[in-house]
């Protein structure tokens, strides 16, 4: 059901460690009829909603402290009906798959606008007609995807991931600090 059709405002949790983005998105979502709760970390978000889970949540993937994936799992455990959209500037196939497995409704790569988020909340099924890319992933993108998969297998533990990849921890941190190469139309 569309949040705008309800007599009572739908509750929405917004979680992002970028304060400016968080505040701009909050204004936009309030204009669309949501009652908004803000948090700048997964830990503070969970504390704010653990006794009264929101109907909707927008969760940034990469934040200091726990990742957004941890919060997705916690929110899905609180209320299976919560529609969760994961946002990230560090999109990867591995994290998209994990987010969906953990209970996210949708996964969007930044930049996005409020209308795209609302549309993601309302989307119930996948799109079999999505355009498939005819270009293979670049070597840099393949490396990024592999690192993200191994990182997910190690529950976000940088040291364990570095050992698994036979890589120095600082090298891995440097690679994780860089944004992945653009990958048009990955279809997630």
Image (spheres, rainbow, N blue to C red):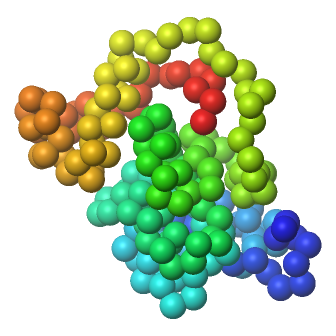
User: From the viewer's perspective, is 148 left or right of 54?
Assistant: left
Question: Residue 70 appears at what percent x and percent y?
Answer: 38, 63
Question: Residue 69 appears at what percent x and percent y?
Answer: 42, 57
Image vertical order of residue 35 relative to residue 140, above or below: below
Tell which of 129 and 180 is nearer to you: 129
- The image quarter containing residue 28 is bottom right
Image vertical order of residue 64 relative to residue 34, above or below: above
Tell me if residue 86 can be seen.
yes
Q: Residue at x 58, y 26 (%)?
A: 186
User: From the viewer's perspective, is 31 left or right of 76?
Assistant: right
**Quarter of the image with the C terminus in it:** top right
Tell which of 158 and 20 is nearer to you: 158
Tell which of 133 and 87 is nearer to you: 133
Q: Residue at x 42, y 38 (%)?
A: 94
> Which residue extends farthest top?
135
Q: Residue at x 57, y 40 (%)?
A: 109
């Amino acid at each position: 059901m569309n949040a705008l059709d309800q007599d009572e405002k739908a509750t929405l949790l917004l979680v992002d460690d970028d304060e400016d983005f968080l505040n701009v998105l909050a204004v936009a979502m309030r204009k669309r009829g949501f009652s908004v709760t803000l948090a700048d970390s997964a830990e503070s978000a969970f504390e704010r909603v653990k006794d009264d889970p929101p109907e909707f949540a927008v969760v940034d993937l990469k934040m200091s402290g726990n990742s957004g994936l941890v919060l997705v799992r916690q929110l899905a455990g609180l209320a299976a009906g919560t529609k969760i959209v994961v946002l990230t500037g560090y999109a990867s196939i591995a994290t998209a798959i994990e987010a969906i497995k953990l209970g996210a409704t949708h996964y969007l790569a930044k930049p996005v606008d409020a209308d795209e988020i609302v549309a993601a909340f309302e989307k119930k099924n996948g799109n079999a007609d999505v355009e498939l890319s005819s270009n293979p992933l670049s070597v840099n993108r393949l490396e990024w995807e592999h690192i993200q998969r191994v990182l997910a297998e190690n529950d976000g533990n940088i040291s364990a991931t570095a050992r698994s990849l036979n890589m120095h921890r600082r090298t891995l941190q440097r690679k994780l600090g860089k944004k992945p190469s653009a990958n048009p139309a990955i279809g997630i």
